[in-house]
Image (cartoon, rainbow, N blue to C red):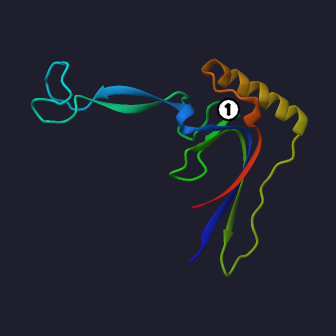
Amino acid sequence: MSTTYTAYTVIGVHLTKRQLTEPIAVRGCNCDVPDKATRFCPHCGKKMFVSKNLWRLKTTDDDRLTANIRLILPYNGSDNYFAGMVLSCDAPWSSADEKPCWDFKHWPADKVIQDLLVELQDLLKPLALWDEREFGIHTFVGTR
């Protein structure tokens, strides 16, 4: 039996689920009943409207916001997200193999970080999500 640990380093910003979502009211049932000022459907008894969270940032299937920026949830159930450039390392640990597999690339850090900063600002400022104090290098470990 083995466990896979993944170390993530995200160069980017920390965001909370509350910042990334906005509540909207949606119909609570599919009954053919006109929307009235009642709280519950007279046909099925469900609430006429329920609150649902709408994501403010659109991602692709692989959690990309842009070609260079991903939105990362460190672990299920967390309310903390990170948007930025992700460096990760899968490290299978078992009795047979106790050495992690590192796969980091070398790149000109100053230029990459400055370009990333500008790209994140352009993406997050229109949504009032940019906070310079939250920009930095964030590191965490997750299991799979």
Where residue 111 appears, as percent x and y from the top left, is 88, 32
Q: From what the image shows, is residue 25 above or below residue 89?
A: above
Residue nearest the viewer, comparing 89 with 42:
42
> At 78% from the left edge and 24% from the top edge, which residue is drawn?
118
Residue nearest the viewer, comparing 1 with 9:
9
Q: From what the image shows, is residue 99 above or below residue 103?
A: below
- Tag 1's secondary structure? loop
> At 55% from the left edge and 44% from the top edge, which residue is drawn?
79
Q: Is 41 on the left-hand or right-hand side of 127?
A: left
Where residue 46 appears, as percent x and y from the top left, is 19, 36
Q: Is 27 on the left-hand or right-hand side of 69?
A: left
Where residue 5 appears, as percent x and y from the top left, is 65, 64
Q: Is 25 on the left-hand or right-hand side of 133?
A: left
> At 87% from the left edge and 47% from the top edge, which residue is drawn?
106
Where residue 78 appears, as percent x and y from the top left, is 55, 49
> At 67% from the left edge and 68% from the top edge, which residue is drawn?
92
Q: Is 117 on the left-hand or right-hand side of 90?
A: right
- What's under tag 1, amino acid-wise? Ala
Quick check: can you spot residue 59? no
Q: Quadrant of residue 50?
A: top left
Characterize the local packing of mark 1: few (<14), some (14-19) or many (20 or more) Cα atoms within 10 angstroms: few
Residue nearest the viewer, comparing 20 with 62:
20
Query: How many numbered circles does the render carry?
Result: 1
Quick check: can you spot residue 128? yes
Q: Quadrant of residue 15?
A: top right
Task: Report the residue marked by disc 1.
Answer: 67
> Which of the image's four quarters has the N terminus?
bottom right
Outermost residue to the left: 43
> Which of the image's four quarters has the C terminus?
bottom right
